[in-house]
Amino acid sequence: MIRRPPRSTLFPYTTLFRSRRSIVLFILGLILNSKYNLGCELSEMRILGVLQRFAVTYFVVATLQLLSERPGDVYQFECWAPLRDFIPYWYQWVFMGIIVATHVSITFYLPIPGCPTGYLGPGGLHDNSSFVNCTGGAAGFIDRLVLGQNHMYKTQSFKNLYDTTLAYDPEGILGYLTSIFVGFLGLQAGKILTMFPLYSARVKRWLFWAFVTGAIGATLCKLSENTGWIPINKNLWSLSFALVTSSMAFTMLTLCYLLVDVYHIVSGAPFYFVGMNSILIYVGQEVTSSTFPWNFPVSQTHFSQLCMDLWGTTLWVIISVWLYYCNFFLAV
């Protein structure tokens, strides 16, 4: 009989592995950022980004789970076994509650010089130019204070629309808190998958979380665009945005699980080809997005740009299929 090493023995090695993965992702993100930094001037280098956020989110959530990991499904015969994906991990939820409360408190109560407390707008021309230098509210203020404008994203989507002059990073520091919460909800979905073998038990629980997160998110935004308590805002990664997108993720996970694994209506292709080399495809797309044959001049209409994006995506799907049948897989 092969004995499982005690958790105290495994902890240093698994922590080291998670640290290595997070460091590699963060460095890859910095390398990709240098693509948009002509001359690779370190004084102008953007520090944060998508992969950097993945790195931090993964490290926090994985470490939190590792600290409470148990060998096997040890609670399956307890009277509260139907809730064993939740009750034994109550302190994880307390920690996530602190993270969410911290995000909301900073967003709505942090004093910002020259700006109203709780401002969530883009600044500039917004609201008749009432808050020109308040871009991003607390989130933007923290990034400019900690990172400095030179190390932030400089081509935000609302810059031309509102004529903003202050930098704002959509992958900024404050948004890491809600990203960690979303990652934790993904961990919850994984716990359900590993602890409950019956497909009906999995589906019921995923749909339950889809309903709970969606209902809370809808309540926070009052089902409106801008007048809710916490509007849905992707650039800010607001709490309502995190909850509503998590609800969509739980729903899509359930749908794909039923179609692919339960009823075998579809095989999962071509998505699993891309998923087997996800980091390679992401980095490749970032590097080649402005090069031929992934990109070439077309008319500046929404339809033409949509077709160009679909073309670039199709090329990478084809490449992922080829890599799959070449048995080539790259992971970090």
Image (spheres, rainbow, N blue to C red):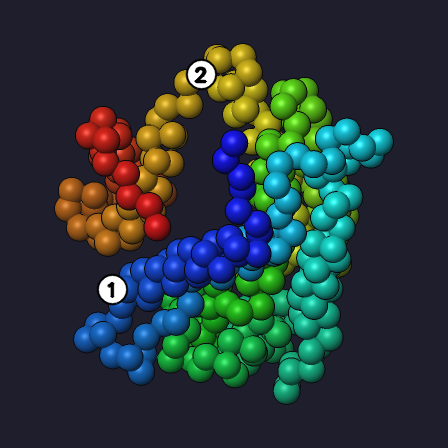
Which residue has dot 1 on it?
Answer: 35
Q: Which of the two residues, 11 or 52, is positioned nearer the viewer here?
A: 11
Considering only vertical position in the picture, is 18 above or below 200? below
The kind of secondary structure element at disc 2 is loop
Note whether residue 156 is visible. yes
In the displayed structure image, the side of residue 123 where residue 77 appears, left or right: right
The tag earlier along the polypeptide, 2 or 1, is 1
The kind of secondary structure element at disc 1 is helix
Q: Residue furthest front?
A: 1
Note whether residue 55 is visible. no
Q: Amino acid at mark 2?
A: Val
| Residue 331 x %, y % | 33, 46
Please report the residue visible at 61 percent of the width from the left and 41 percent of the height from the top.
Answer: 71
| Residue 144 x %, y % | 49, 80
Which residue has dot 2 on it?
Answer: 266
Q: Which of the two residues, 102 or 91, is positioned nearer the viewer here?
A: 91
| Residue 228 x %, y % | 73, 55
In the displayed structure image, the side of residue 155 where residue 288 appears, left or right: left
In the displayed structure image, the side of residue 143 where residue 230 appears, left or right: right
In the displayed structure image, the side of residue 8 where residue 203 appears, left or right: right
Q: Residue furthest bottom?
A: 113
- Location of residue 227 by image quarter: bottom right
Q: Which of the two residues, 2 or 75, is positioned nearer the viewer here?
A: 2
Gap in angstroms between the C-alphas marked 2 and 1: 38 Å
Q: Residues within 10 Å of mark 1 (few under 14, many from 20)?
A: few
